[in-house]
Image (tube, helix red, strand yellow):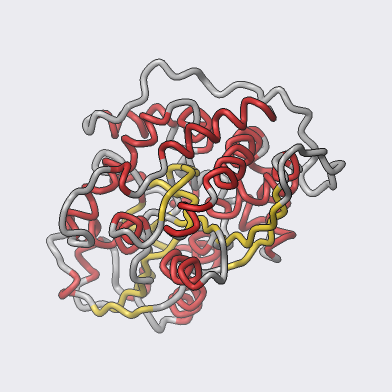
Amino acid sequence: MSNFTDFTMSRRSLLAGLAGLGLAATGLAGCGGSGNEDKPAGSTPAKAESSYDPVTLKVAYMPNLGSAGSLFAAIDQGYFDEVGITVEPQQFQKGPAEITALQSGEIDIAQIGHGAHSLCIQGEAKIFAFDQLSKADAVVANKAKGIEKAADLKGKTVGVAAGTSSEIILQYVLEDAGLTKDDVTLTEMDVSGMTTALISGQIDAAATWSPATVTLEQELGDDYLVLGTNVDYSDKVAFPGSYICAVDYAEENADILARFGAAIIKAHIYRAEHTEDLAKMLAKELELPEDTLVASVGEGDWEGAVEADKDVETVKGYYEAQQKVFLDGGAIDAEVPVEDYVLVDVMTDAQKVYADIK
């Protein structure tokens, strides 16, 4: 298997995998120019005048391109200014912790990866904006620990962050090898701890994500082994990332959420057209090595997000497919209507606001 950072799977290939689930978007226009005069990433655009009532939002993200990319693009390019929003970014390490912070009122909005969506399905938060289909997660191993294939994980120690999309990938990797979680020793760790532990030999493998995968490949060299990624299982399930808020916040602030969503729609276009520039800007903002962020530019289906923004039904299809993996893995007990936890009306209103600011 080629290294995770080398995956350059096209949207056509990804949607072909989803076609078996009836999710392939048909008749969608290709990714075109935004019609905007984009500023160089990291520059300070002139503050846009806005007719909207000003609001300041605390928004959670995780320190990787997939989670932080659209948020910081919208900040950097002044798209939030156009809809009267000031963003105070708040860094977290995983989605479940973000949801806890939403519920306590510590933050207003959060960007989550695939794994934490199960909590939204269970009614703990509302999804109001689609962000992207992820290709960032991977189960990786240290070959020096006697691992050449997934079956060699039996009896090994694997680092994992519970409730994350990488945990789902680990489940699939184990199943394909004829193993279960009972066949390995799972050690709960955050992504930083997993990276250090795998490099130092404290664990044998890790269910992790980019840009940690880039760092691990650099540090382990020839001993770095990828056992499975999102891309390997794209024929089974979609792995969306989304923006979410607390249930009570959604009930009282639909207008603000639509404005936020419009800025993100605009940011999706910038992200697709200037991915490497955005990665370099994020490296400075997040104080991460630039080469690590640039190497992770393939971790999401950026062009696909631009196209999906034009068709809410396509986005609903992603969330319907996502429930399948949660059902199969026991993370949820029963399928629920997407509209119960995804604010489709807000997504539609966001498209209308975007039409006014594009």
**Percent from the top left, x then y, of residue 260?**
60, 45
Question: Relative to 349, is 342 above or below?
Answer: below
**Residue at the far bottom in the pictured view:** 202
Residue at the far front: name it.
252
199, 350: nearer the viewer: 350
Nearest the viewer among 285 and 48 is 48
**Image label count:** 0
Left or right: 312, with 33 as reference point: left
**8 to 241, vertically: above or below:** above
**Is 34 located above or below residue 148 in the figure?**
above
Give the residue drawn at x 45%, y 59%.
248
Using the rendered view, name the quadrant where residue 247 is placed.
bottom left
Q: Residue furthest left?
A: 178
Q: Position of residue 196 (x, y in %)?
A: 50, 78
Decide which of 246, 68 is in the foreground and name it. Answer: 246
Residue at 57% x, 66% y is: 107
- The image position of residue 206, as x and y in percent, is 37, 69
Give above or below for 131 relative to 310. below
Whether residue 108 is visible = yes
**Residue lying furthest top in this view?**
27
**Left or right, 229 with reference to 80:** left
Residue nearest the viewer, comparing 216 with 277: 277
Q: Is residue 165 shown to the viewer in this render?
A: no
Question: Residue 186 at what x, y percent from top left?
Answer: 28, 77
Figure quadrant of the C terminus = top right
Task: Residue at 43%, 31% (x, y): give it.
Answer: 11
**Figure quadrant of residue 35:** top right
